[in-house]
């Protein structure tokens, strides 16, 4: 099979994987279906500029079209299959596809650098109270991570510091988050970058990783998991911490107090209000009233759109690995640019800055 045929085969496979029809690709990219057919049949060479657009649309790297993609993983195939079973739109499937490519890239880069996969504890659950078990696991994890009685302002960054990648991508309206776990590769978390309560979503997926109930999980809006939901509450809002913060507010039914607490914990209003009621801080009447109130809308009017705290583009773990191997010339600048979705010039500038900082230490 020659290069053109490989490119054509990969173009067709990528399009069919995410579920786009030729007509949809034509409309989105402004190319004719006849031209697309010529590219996919290996009869015509697509320009690099078009390959970049197709790679972004399908959630792959440009290098994939040339047949460069060796790492296999049953868990990644399973994730894609589960996503299709949920009848998610092609735009969302495309981002899940990209998540898989990024996960595989992290695995390959770790292998290049000889970095071991992170060790993550496993908690066996029994038939006893789900809430009590979630509370014990949350307490153990807070102790293991050295959190004490403090607020966790950015759980994603905390997990990435212990080498668990948290990848943020726009997933549309239907999917909030996902995770994959493989004993050979360890765990990866995917979070919808358009959702405001990042901490809650990351904690929810982390709970799935800790219990190892499934190798993959997709958090489609409307689905529920009792253990994970209770873990989120006890991990992000342990009783002693909530009580301490509540004392700073004279009236918890005041919207300013609720907005302040929600922004502190990085969770949804429903989770916050339910927890305050659970701990006896607000009564039944106020619970129902506040759950009906549109506090999200009010917060947006006061503070603007609820953009999540994302100090790292896509994933801190990914950036560190890519820039490290690029610095040691184990991958090309153009390949690093493809993975991180920034220009080769920007990669060069970042590497130059890193080198300047290292030289200033010596």
Image: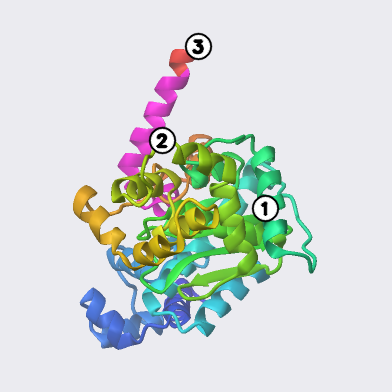
Instruction: Find out whether residue 212 is within the magenta segment.
Output: no
Which of label 2 and label 3 is nearer to you? 2
Residue at 55% from the left image edge and 75% from the top image edge = 80
Instruction: Find out whether residue 350 is within the magenta segment.
Output: yes
Mark on residue 135? Answer: 1
Residue placed most toward the observer, 325 or 181: 181
Kindly tell me whether residue 149 is visible in this rendering: yes
Q: How packed is label 1: few (under 14 Cα within 10 Å), some, or many (20 or more)? A: many
Residue 56: x and y, percent? 36, 65
Kindly tell me whether residue 72 is visible in this rendering: no
Residue 249: x and y, percent? 38, 39
Magenta residues, as a range?
335-358
Residue placed most toward the observer, 132 or 167: 132
Residue placed most toward the observer, 30 or 229: 229
Above-or-below relation of 198 to 42: above
Q: Secondary structure at mark 3?
A: loop
Which of label 2 and label 1 is nearer to you? 2
Between the residue at mark 3 and the residue at mark 1, the CA separation in whole angstroms equals: 48 Å
Mark on residue 362? Answer: 3
Mark nearer the N terminus (2 vs 1): 1
Q: Quadrant of residue 40?
A: bottom left
Q: Secondary structure at mark 1?
A: helix
Q: How packed is label 3: few (under 14 Cα within 10 Å), some, or many (20 or more)? A: few
Between the residue at mark 2 and the residue at mark 1, the CA separation in whole angstroms equals: 25 Å
Mark on residue 248? Answer: 2
Residue placed most toward the observer, 226 or 362: 226
Residue 336: x and y, percent? 44, 48
Above-or-below relation of 183 to 147: below
């Amino acid at each position: 099979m020659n290069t053109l045929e490989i490119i054509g085969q990969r173009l067709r496979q990528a399009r069919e994987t995410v579920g786009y029809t030729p007509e949809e690709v034509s409309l989105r990219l402004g190319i004719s279906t006849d031209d697309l057919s010529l590219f996919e049949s290996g009869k015509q060479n697509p320009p690099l500029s078009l390959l970049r657009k197709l790679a972004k649309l399908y959630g792959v790297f440009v290098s994939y079209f040339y047949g460069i993609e060796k790492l296999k993983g049953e868990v990644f195939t399973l994730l894609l299959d589960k996503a299709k079973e949920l009848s998610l739109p092609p735009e969302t499937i495309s981002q899940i596809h990209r998540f898989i490519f990024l996960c595989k890239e992290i695995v390959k880069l770790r292998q290049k650098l000889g970095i071991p996969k992170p060790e993550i504890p496993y908690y066996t659950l029994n038939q006893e109270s789900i809430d009590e078990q979630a509370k014990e696991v949350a307490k153990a994890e807070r102790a293991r991570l050295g959190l004490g009685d403090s607020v966790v302002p950015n759980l994603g960054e905390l997990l990435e510091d212990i080498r668990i990648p948290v990848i943020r991508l726009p997933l549309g309206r239907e999917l909030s988050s996902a995770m994959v776990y493989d004993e050979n590769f360890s765990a990866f978390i995917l979070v919808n970058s358009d959702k405001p309560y990042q901490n809650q979503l990351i904690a929810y997926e982390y709970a799935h990783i800790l219990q190892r109930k499934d190798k993959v999980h997709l958090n489609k809006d409307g689905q529920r998991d009792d253990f994970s939901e209770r873990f989120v509450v006890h991990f992000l809002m342990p009783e002693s911490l909530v009580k301490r913060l509540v004392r700073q507010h004279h009236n918890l039914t005041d919207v300013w107090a609720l907005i302040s607490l929600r922004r502190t914990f990085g969770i949804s209003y429903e989770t916050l209000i339910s927890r305050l009621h659970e701990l006896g801080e607000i009564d039944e009447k106020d619970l129902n009233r506040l759950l009906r109130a549109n506090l999200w809308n009010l917060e947006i009017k006061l503070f603007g759109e609820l953009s999540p705290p994302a100090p790292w583009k896509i994933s801190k773990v990914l950036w560190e690995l890519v820039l490290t191997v690029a610095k040691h010339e184990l991958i090309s600048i153009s390949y690093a640019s493809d993975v991180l979705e920034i220009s080769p010039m920007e990669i060069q500038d970042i590497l130059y800055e890193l080198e300047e900082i290292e030289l200033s230490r010596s």
